């Protein structure tokens, strides 16, 4: 049987089956961008490949997936970082017009070309570490025109680079200056979500449910509007306090609940019942010097899927390294090597509703690969500030 490409002499991290599903000295083959064979050396003798690639004993994982980023924005908040080093609090900075609002001002003033130019280096840093799929949220425009601008730039990034971009509408990220929360949420639900859905600019809707942002009731209003317009649901929940947002989102069939440092037993049980993925964001925990750990052991015991992401954003997680995020998840959250690698592959795919198409080395899935110069899978999580990526493959093509 013909196949387009066969990679051989490879150690495979399939993330398919118990543990990481490692196959040492394995082979993987693809045709028309899809995986047609995965197995041990000698198991592909029935294939006649158009091209054979000797991987030289390197390791191959699924292409990494970042399921939670705010990658498209203008401006820089290093100045706030310095203020915080001198003891100025988030609240003081926000009251002085800093925080999310300062990024909103800069993003509103930026053209699409400006946003593209500012975002490409951040995206390239992610691709350099083996990312093949990346979610990008809006949320720094807070008007229909500026939220649309962000989502269009996100789409253009997917045209200019070999990466699958998954857009999420996060108009309910912050209360715009001069607006009142409820009347703004009404606009998000009655004007922005219908327009974004009609334009096909987003697959999901997200909301920041927090005592400094939107209430659980307002979040539920957003969920209902999202469902009315055929969009999936995500939530930034229990990051600073317990607003019971994750349980509410799970009851609405949310793909994921993200941050969840303050998640309680009811929230865990609701997520388990709904199959809602826990997206853990160690970069934000680290950068904000948080001290409340997410309930990892309880989530693990309950069988809630655990995904990881960079939460790449200018305020709480200026991070564009999935490898460092994995190390932080292991070091700060005590997640295992298997959980960290699965968190940026199989479980991140699940958080994006793509578990049947990406995130594993399995027949029928997209042939998105990351080829690594490592001695064992643990090397991907263990090292800090070192990038062992040898090659990236997108739908069967080296990129
Ligand atoms: O500070 C920023 O720019 C975004 C913060 C980011 N957004 C959110 O809902 N939670 C976060 O940590
Ligand atoms: Fe976020």
Image (cartoon, rainbow, N blue to C red):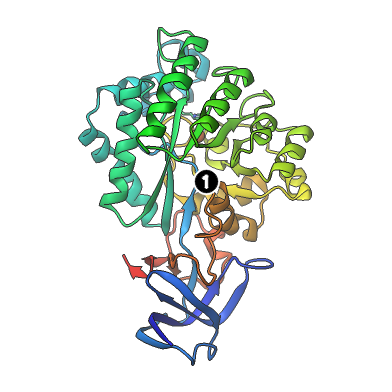
335 left or right of 380 in image? right
User: Could you tell me residue 75's position as x and y percent?
Assistant: 31, 28
Q: Position of residue 35 (x, y in %)?
A: 47, 72
Please tell me which residue is depicted at 55% across the width and 32% down the height of the picture: 227
Q: Quadrant of residue 24?
A: bottom right
Secondary-structure class at tag 1 = loop
Place of residue 294 in the rendered image (x, y in percent of width and height, measured from the top left): 68, 38
The CB of the residue at mark 1 lies under 8 Å from ligand 2: no
Instruction: Locate the N terminus and report the quarter of the image it occupies.
Output: bottom left
Q: Is residue 219 above or below residue 363?
A: above
Residue 81 appears in the picture as rendered:
no
Q: Is residue 384 above or below residue 53?
A: above
Residue lying at 66% horizontally and 24% vertically, measured from the top left: 241
Q: Tell whether 189 sits left or right of 115.
A: right
Res. 349 visible in picture: yes
The residue labelled by disc 1 is: 309
Mark 1 residue crowding within 10 angstroms, few (<14) / some (14–19) / many (20+): many
Asked whether, in this view, residue 281 is left or right of residue 269, the answer is left
Residue drawn at point x = 65 percent, y = 43 percent: 276
Out of 289 and 195, give the one closest to the viewer.
195
Which residue sits at x=53%, y=82%?
26
Q: Tell how many labels.
A: 1
Q: Quadrant of the C terminus?
A: bottom left
Residue 131: x %, y % from top left: 42, 56
Pick the residue in front: 2 or 329: 2
Q: Tell me if 37 is positioned left or right of 250 in this view.
A: left
């Amino acid at each position: 049987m013909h196949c387009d490409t066969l990679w051989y002499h490879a150690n495979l991290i399939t993330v398919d089956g118990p543990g990481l599903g490692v196959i040492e000295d394995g082979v993987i083959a693809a045709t028309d961008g899809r995986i047609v064979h995965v197995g041990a050396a000698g198991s592909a003798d029935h294939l006649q490949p158009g091209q054979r690639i000797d991987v030289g004993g390197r390791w191959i994982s699924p292409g990494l997936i970042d399921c939670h980023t705010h990658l498209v924005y203008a401006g820089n908040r290093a100045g706030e970082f310095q203020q915080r080093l001198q003891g100025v609090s988030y609240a003081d900075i926000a009251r002085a017009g800093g925080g999310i609002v300062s990024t909103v001002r800069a993003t509103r003033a930026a053209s699409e070309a400006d946003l593209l130019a500012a975002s490409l280096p951040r995206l390239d840093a992610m691709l350099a570490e083996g990312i093949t799929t990346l979610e990008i949220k809006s949320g720094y425009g807070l008007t229909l025109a500026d939220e649309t601008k962000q989502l269009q730039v996100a789409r253009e990034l997917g045209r200019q680079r070999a990466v699958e971009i998954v857009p999420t509408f996060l108009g309910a990220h912050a209360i715009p200056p001069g607006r009142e929360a409820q009347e703004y949420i009404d606009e998000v639900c009655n004007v922005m979500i219908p327009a974004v859905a009609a334009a096909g600019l987003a697959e999901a809707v997200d909301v920041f449910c927090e005592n400094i942002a939107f209430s659980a009731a307002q979040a539920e209003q957003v969920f209902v509007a999202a469902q009315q317009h055929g969009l999936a649901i995500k939530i930034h929940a229990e990051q600073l306090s317990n607003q019971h947002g994750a349980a509410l989102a799970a009851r609405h069939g949310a793909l994921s609940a993200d941050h969840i440092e303050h998640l309680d037993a009811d929230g865990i049980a609701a997520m388990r019942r709904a199959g809602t993925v826990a997206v853990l964001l160690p970069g934000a925990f680290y950068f904000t010097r948080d001290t409340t750990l997410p309930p990892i052991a309880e989530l693990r015991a309950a069988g809630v899927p655990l995904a990881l992401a960079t939460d790449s954003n200018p305020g709480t997680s200026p991070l564009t390294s999935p490898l460092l995020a994995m190390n932080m998840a292991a070091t700060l959250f005590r997640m295992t090597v298997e959980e960290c690698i699965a968190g940026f592959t199989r479980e991140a795919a699940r958080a994006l509703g793509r578990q049947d198409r990406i995130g594993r080395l399995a027949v029928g899935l997209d042939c998105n690969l990351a080829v690594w110069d490592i001695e064992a899978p643990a090397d991907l999580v263990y090292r800090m500030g070192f990038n062992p990526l040898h090659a990236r493959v997108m739908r069967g093509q080296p990129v």
